[in-house]
Image: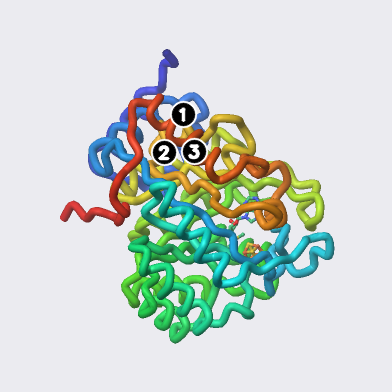
Amino acid sequence: MVQLEADIRELIRQAEKIHRLSEDEIVRLLRAADAEEALAAAADRVRAAYVGDGVHLRGLIEFSSYCRRDCLYCGLRRSNSKAERYRLEAAEILRLARQAKAFGYHTVVLQSGEDLYFTAERLAEILRAVKKLDLAVTLSLGERSYEEYRLLREAGADRFLLRIETSDAGLYEQMDPGMRWEERCRCLQDLRRLGYEVGTGCLVGLPGQTDVSLARDILFFQQLDADMVGIGPLIPNGDTPLATAAAGDFHLTRRMVSLIRLLLPEANIPATTAMETLQPDARVLILQSGANVVMPNVTEGEARRKYALYPGKACVADTPAACRHCMEGKIQAMGRYVAKDQGFRQHRK
Ligand code: SAM
Ligand code: SF4
């Protein structure tokens, strides 16, 4: 057992008890490599107390790899001429949603690049069909106007995932050329006003990102009262301007996940594929460090391979059925269970 400094132990105790820390205190914990296990243990207790032992499986459908944006880190960026582009037909999306339902998933996540071929009207039609399957639906398709978000919400979308990537406005605008930090915040506010469950998150390991900015990311999520927070390490993609960047640090990302659980105890927190890509079986470790959600991929065949955000994506060669069984086995081996409900955030007060 590592002997932690008394004040580090005290900070973890405070976070576990009152779920509040200052920016400086978060930075101290992010920098305390030897506090990682104690942080994870505290986060695991808070996870058990607030969201229980159920692990929510959300079936991920990657329905288009077209993107009008040019984020420096992402394989789907429009300038990546090597990216293989595809769009799934509405009927195929619906078939995958049925498949997800048959696997026992209670949510599907419809994710894509920012592809304006999928107008709000087209998406609304797809949503209405998917909602007939009695599934919760999360959208993750980037920035749209208030009016478009409204149409999608009315068509049945329950949740929306839109990561801020970083709360450092200057770094954000450098990493996502042509995008504006204020616009990102506008989208999150609109989604909140429209009654979506709001999911956000950040990348760990962007060039120029500091521990202070990561601490501010967490405070941003807390201030937003995010319903979901997804954290992943940057995985450099050789076909992007960040080809030679270092990958995000696995342990720092794990400390981020634990701190987010401690400071946003009710949030749904996924153990992300990017973590698994850095280290085999990472999702199990992250589920034991504060997370309570996994998003197994239900995209099939060529599309699964072509949705290449970064190289070496975990499970890319597996079938959706294999993913389903593999995840269930791992969850049971941890003494946890696959949740049977749609996994909306439960407010404790
Ligand atoms: N286009 C939508 C958007 O950006 O919100 C949704 C899809 S986008 C591919 C989903 C997330 O993938 C992004 O928010 C980003 O954090 C993550 N991502 C993209 N490239 C990545 C990389 N090289 N390493 C790790 N995560 C990456
Ligand atoms: Fe497009 Fe999203 Fe990738 Fe940015 S992160 S290039 S918006 S798919």
Element marked by disc 1: helix
Q: Is residue 175 above or below residue 272?
A: below
Element marked by disc 3: helix
Who's the residue at 39% across and 47% down the image? 104
Please say if the residues under marks 1 and 2 sit with CB atoms less than 8 Å apart: yes
Residue identified by numbered label 1: 36
Residue 326, percent from left and from top: 50, 33
Q: Nearer the viewer, residue 19 or 277?
A: 277
Amino acid marked by disc 3 = Leu
Residue identified by numbered label 2: 258
Who's the residue at 48% across and 48% down the image? 295
Residue 38, percent from left and from top: 39, 26
Who's the residue at 55% across and 38% down the image? 322
State the CA–CA distance, disc 1 to disc 2: 8 Å
Q: Nearer the viewer, residue 123 or 77?
A: 123
Q: Quadrant of residue 240?
A: bottom right
